[in-house]
Amino acid sequence: MNRKIAIVAGTLLCLISFLYGGTIFEDAFNNANNWVTVSGAPQTNCSGGLYNVIVPGGQQAIIKNSTALPAQYTYSAKFKVNTFPAQQAVGIIFNMQADMQCYVLFIANTRQYTFGKFVKSGSSLSFQSISYGWNSFISLDNNTLKVSKKNGETSLYCNGVLLERLTNSDFSAGNIGFFIGGGINVSFDHVLVTDQYKKGEYVTGFRDSFDDNDIVGWAPINNNPATVKSEGGVLKISNVNSQLTLFTSGLYKNKACTTIVTYKGGNKEALYGVNFFKMETPSITKSYLFWINANRKYAVCHTGTYLPHGPESYINGTTDTLVVSKDYKFYINGKLAYDSINDAGFDFNAVAFNVNPGVSIEAQIFKVGEPGGVPIIYSPNSNHVNYNPHKYLLGGLGLIYDTRGRKVASFEGKGYHEKLKDLSSGPYYIIMKGKKNHVIRRAIVNIK
């Protein structure tokens, strides 16, 4: 999937250091000799480069490796969960003591992560939670969990995304291991421990052009049953029974968001669009909604307090470009809706597609947290196309759409200019389609 999480230059240097750091332990699971069960009665076997573990229902298992961890290290484990019962968890253990006290990072099939510790309570171990949260980058099957520690600072990752960074120094050394909850069937694929510390940065930007058949980085709240597919540059959402909030996690304070949405059918009064929200518990604690519908109405509101305005002539009701600026103003096809949010600056930790029951939509592009945010709007002062190649056009492949969402031309290199000359007066959307992982650039060009 053509996406890029915004990463600062310092993180890249840290990653390079990590990649070339000294390896303390690595296991590609050609055999199971490096691992021993210290709690529970799991079934284990090693085959085809996989360490397979099945834990009977009603039990939990702790599996240990004797590798001694230094004061500074990064420990990662790649695994696939084949059976993932509700209210169960699987994860990694680190800084395990001789009496089995240790830290643990697990994930659950609700895409929740929990960081905590097992401590002695009499003759048995009890779990104490230190921190937890939800993250859209946690998968329901394939995951890589990673922990990096240095001088008491602990950074937690899943699938390359920083979940949390905190300070805790109860256990300063020890061993590594796995934790597997009851009824879980999991296959561990690769384990790596290096002597480097990976600090990382939180996600503050996200881009998706929906090129591949997956929705990595997206998750529905409450396991909504709506059909969601990503293919051929389009995200398809067929939502029938209940409201869908399909979110991506990140720190989005004062971040702009842009997407192009197309109404495909269903209830014309049903609203759909963009939702910024804060999730601190299993429910959303604060939410701002930016919605339109096929009857050309819009709503800009706090959760539960919306009243659609319109219809408005600048809303197509077919294909529309929705932009939320970094100060939370709502632009529809380049037109500023008169409503706005008064308390801009709130610390949102997710942004989402929000789709009401009974409507189906498609999205072509989604980006949040990139520089700018409001599409570049050119206002010509003569009877020709007004453009600035130094600000926008870098060459490449692209498409041109009219305001009804119809593709009217395609171009290569800087040939967009000649194609625009052949079009009638009015606004058009230019969408640059770069190579894999390149920035997608867009402008609204007015022709007179």
Image: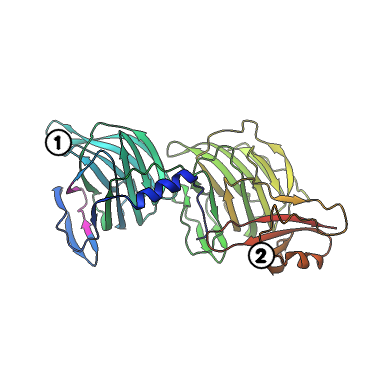
The numbered disc on residue 124 is: 1
How far apart are labels 2 and 1 at the CA level? 63 Å
Q: Kindly identify the amino acid type of the residue bearing the numbered disc 1.
A: Ser
> Which stretch is magenta?
52-67
Image coordinates for residue 97, horizontal then vertical, percent:
17, 38
What secondary structure is found at the residue carrying circle 2?
strand
Q: Which residue is mark 2?
A: 398
Tell me if I can see residue 356 in this picture: no
Examine the structure image and report whether residue 237 is included in the region drawn in magenta.
no
Side of 60 where 290 appears, left or right: right
Considering only vertical position in the picture, is 442 above or below 309? below
State the quadrant of the C terminus: bottom right
- Is the stretch drawn in magenta largely helix, strand or loop? strand
Image coordinates for residue 65, horizontal then vertical, percent:
18, 49
- Hey, which residue is sitting farthest left in the picture? 123
Considering only vertical position in the picture, is 356 above or below 430? above
Mark 2–mark 1 CB contact (< 8 Å): no
Is residue 98 or residue 301 the one in the foreground?
A: 98
